[in-house]
Image: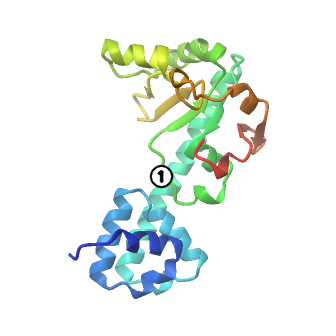
Amino acid sequence: MKKLQHHAISAVLLEPKRGLRFDLDTWQSVILVLREEKLLATLYHLALETAVFEHYPEFAQRHLYSASIYARRQSKQIFYEALLLQELLEKNGVTPIFLKGANYTLRSSRNSQGRICSDIDVLVKVEELDSCESLLLSQNWHSEKLTQYDEQYYRQWAHEIPPLIHPFRGTVLDVHHNLYLPISGRSPKIELFINELEVYGRQFCGFKNSSNSDA
């Protein structure tokens, strides 16, 4: 396997037709890197958009298509988890605001195509944080045991509580009350974002234009 230069990765993502010039050895390296970086299904969609997918080597097509199936399955799981979360929280007066990859998926933005998420991120008002956490804990969500220092870090300095895990579905949930560490002195005035909520799919809430950001 030849040593792969980083520009080959960025080049094929920016311009998928460049993959037509890759030899099989380069393709093998590209596939390994893109799988590790969770971008293999993204290339699948980009290649379809630019009508070059069918001209890729057959083994590359198989890898990209397989990755797209996994990404599609995860997208369905995100919708399922989001519905459960919204039903639980809203009936108790808490409105979850979906962030990052979950936001992209729920609003079906272009950059959700093929996206792989390691967790689901939601934001709630800081005054709703305790009740939100209690509700989730009552539904089997739990956090891993932390050191005293890490627990203090999350509770006093961070912009989120410790990650929660569902024991049966394996879903990881990050519950935020801000977008950045309050201890840094650089966290935004979150009320300004909350006042600009957008409802999409007639169900879920997210920040306006968040599909163009990482928040």
Q: Position of residue 120 (x, y in %)?
A: 52, 37
Quarter occupied by the C terminus:
top right
**Nearer to the camera, 27 or 139:** 27
Q: Is residue 175 left or right of residue 66?
A: right
Res 178 quadrant in image: top right
Residue extending farthest left: 1
Quarter occupied by the N terminus:
bottom left
Q: Position of residue 185 (x, y in %)?
A: 56, 24
Say if 145 sits above or below 203 in the image.
Answer: above
> How busy is the neighbourhood of tag 1: few (under 14 within 10 Å), some, or many (20 plus)?
many
Name the residue carrying label 1: 116
**Nearer to the camera, 168 or 110:** 110
Taking the spot 42% from the left edge, 56% from the top edge, the residue there is 38
For label 1, the SS is loop
> What colour scheme was applied to this rendering of the protein?
rainbow
Taking the spot 64% from the left edge, 24% from the top edge, the residue there is 124
Res 62 quadrant in image: bottom left
**Nearer to the camera, 150 or 96:** 150
Q: Position of residue 151 (x, y in %)?
A: 39, 15
Say if 29 sits above or below 176 in the image.
Answer: below
Q: Amino acid under label 1?
A: Ile
Taking the spot 51% from the left edge, 20% from the top edge, the residue there is 183
Taking the spot 43% from the left edge, 81% from the top edge, the residue there is 19
